[in-house]
Image: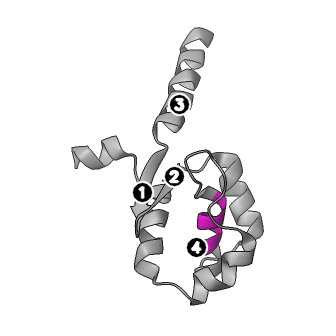
Amino acid sequence: MSSDKLTLIQALQADLKGRRRKVSVLGHDVWVSPFTVEEENLLSEREPKAGAARYVEILIMKCTDESGAPVFSRNDKDLLINGVPSDHLSRLVDAITGPAIAAQAKN
């Protein structure tokens, strides 16, 4: 029985790594991946209420370049909230929080 759980853990870890993907925004490649439970907890601590600040915190936490360096910082927060078109940001948030690509393909 414990070997089944280990196999499931390995499959879940592989799924997380496999769901890292590139999203192009205005000619810039941004890499995103889904939240882990710990990251969701951290998001809830930083921005407990729904709204623009929580939306932008998702981007700050999860958008990286190909090497894994953050694309946005907390210094960008006000500009992300008030100074850029939301449609580009929505594509990034959807890629982070939406269903797995495989699940989307089935629908």
x 42%, y 57%: residue: 23
Q: Amino acid at mark 4?
A: Tyr
Read off the residue under disc 3.
12
Residue 69 locus on image (x, y percent): 66, 52
Q: Earlier in the sequence, mark 4 or mark 3?
A: 3
Given the image, on which type of amino acid does mark 2 rest? Trp
Which of pointers 4 and 2 indicates the residue nearer the eye?
Answer: 2
Distance of label 4 from label 3 (alpha carbons): 26 Å
Give the Cα distance between marks 4 and 2. Answer: 17 Å
| Residue ID at (59%, 55%) | 64
Quadrant of residue 59 within the rendered picture: bottom right
Q: Residue at x 50, y 25 (%)?
A: 11
Q: Amino acid at mark 3?
A: Leu
- Counting from the top left corner in percent of width and height, residue 97 is at 49, 58
Determine the residue located farthest toward the front in the rendered image.
27
Which residue type does callout 1 highlight? Val
